[in-house]
Image: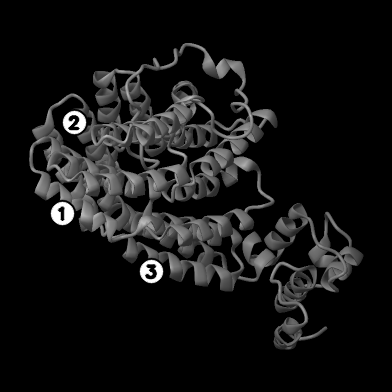
Amino acid sequence: MDGPADELADERADGSADTAADAPAAIGRRVRRLRAERGLTQKQLADPLYSAAYVSTLESGKVRPSGPALRFLAERLGVSYEELATGQPAHLATELRLALTDAGRTLATGPADEAAEHYRRILAEAERLGLADVRAEALLGLGECALESGELPEAVAHFEAAERLLEGEPLPRRARPIRGRAVALLLAGELRYACYLLESAIDELNASGLADPEALVLLYSAVIGPYLDMGAQTRAAHAAELALSLAPRVADPALVAGMHRQVARTLLAGGRPADADASLAKAQAVYRQLRLGTDLAHCHWMRGYVLAQDGELLAAEAELRTAREMLAARRAVLYTAQVEVELADVLRRLGRAGEAAELLSELLELGDRHGAVHAGGAHRLLGLIAEERGDAGSAEEHYVRALALLERSGATGDLADLCRLLGDLLRRTGRTEAALDAYRTGLGHRAAPGTTTLGPAPALPPSPALHGHRPPRSGAGGAPAGQPLEPRSHR
């Protein structure tokens, strides 16, 4: 019988031929080394469930052991299942998972760039140890960090990499990277593709018997934003209804809070500001308890929007400034800039056009890669400010630039409103034919409300999930629009 040192040397020497830690040959070498270290024969290790011949075949790398066989052998050898399967001590994986928790806490309470550093270190170590699940979680964290900092292509890349790692997993396990990628695309102005991703995942979940409540609430909540931005109020209200019906079966309070925050958008679009505010209050209480800084800032943002819609402009300004300060402290560049669009609209309505224009100019310096919808909204507001000071040429220029950005994104409701503004401006300056063209374009965008992807609305979950809930009313009021988490008003 070979000695333990010889076995270890043999395993290291053969490593170049079989680098995968969980490959049959690598597992076989570990079993042989550990058996030798403990002075066991193949028969002693195999008894009473297996044969010496099976252990011999396994040690030679000719067969991949099943899960039950690995657990049996790990117990006999006095090591963890994970250590025998991967070659790494179990405590290393445990420490990395604890580090993921710490990184998540940093992302919730501190700057995104600090959290990203933690996630990058975890990702590198998980790659070295061959821990695919930890790698996927680290990539998801990096994607969330990139969303906050406004690096949208980087966010998409991280979420796609996480999806690839989880490719063989059930769809509920892949819901988070799918949702993350859709959010990044929505922020970049790719509304239709974001809808396509979310609707496809919802269809697959409901049609395959994998109607996991948490995954569905996550996806239904995420699709509300793009639906409203595209003028699909009926679909948004229905998604909210379905999410509410599933919420009692969801154990994650932060996920339920996020759902309430999104449902508030449909309530406001349906002309129910008091109900929207109550929904936001529920979310806000959870975020305070869990110390989720970005999410709490988004609640202040949304409440500012609700107050602005009700004409309570000074209170709206206070809420929006609070959100802006919280997000700026976390160095969440993209979200900070987007709140500034909301704030600029309130300042303009308060008669402080100079302050508003300064905020909007700072946003546009970021470029439309940080969100075509909000860049379009900034140009729209600058057009309104220019009109109010009598500069029709500058107003037209801003409206045209906004139109180009919003046409690219597919934000139907905003496009129709912008065409009306442009048409009115052209009519007042005596360009009747051009004004009619602008009005016709706007009517075209209003012609098919609710159109999202090329297919029908997503399939429904099993009917018991719907009992006891009525859909939020869909009204004629303008749906809040903008980024996937909060609304954008420039009306």
- Secondary element under disc 3, as helix, strand or loop, is helix
Q: Depth-wise, is mark 1 or mark 3 nearer the camera?
A: 1
**Label 2 vs 3, first from the N-terminus:** 3
For mark 2, what is the residue? 308
User: What amino acid is labelled 3 in the image?
Assistant: Glu
Residue 259 in view here: no
Residue for point 75% across, 73% down: 26
User: What amino acid is labelled 1 in the image?
Assistant: Glu
Q: Depth-wise, is mark 2 or mark 1 nearer the camera?
A: 1
Q: Position of residue 301 (x, y in %)?
A: 24, 39
Real-space Cα separation, disc 2 to disc 3, in angstroms: 38 Å
Residue for point 74% across, 54% down: 67
Real-space Cα separation, disc 2 to disc 1, in angstroms: 20 Å
For mark 1, what is the residue? 358
Q: Residues within 10 Å of mark 2 (few under 14, many from 20)?
A: many
**Which numbered disc covers residue 117?**
3
Front one among 436 and 323: 436
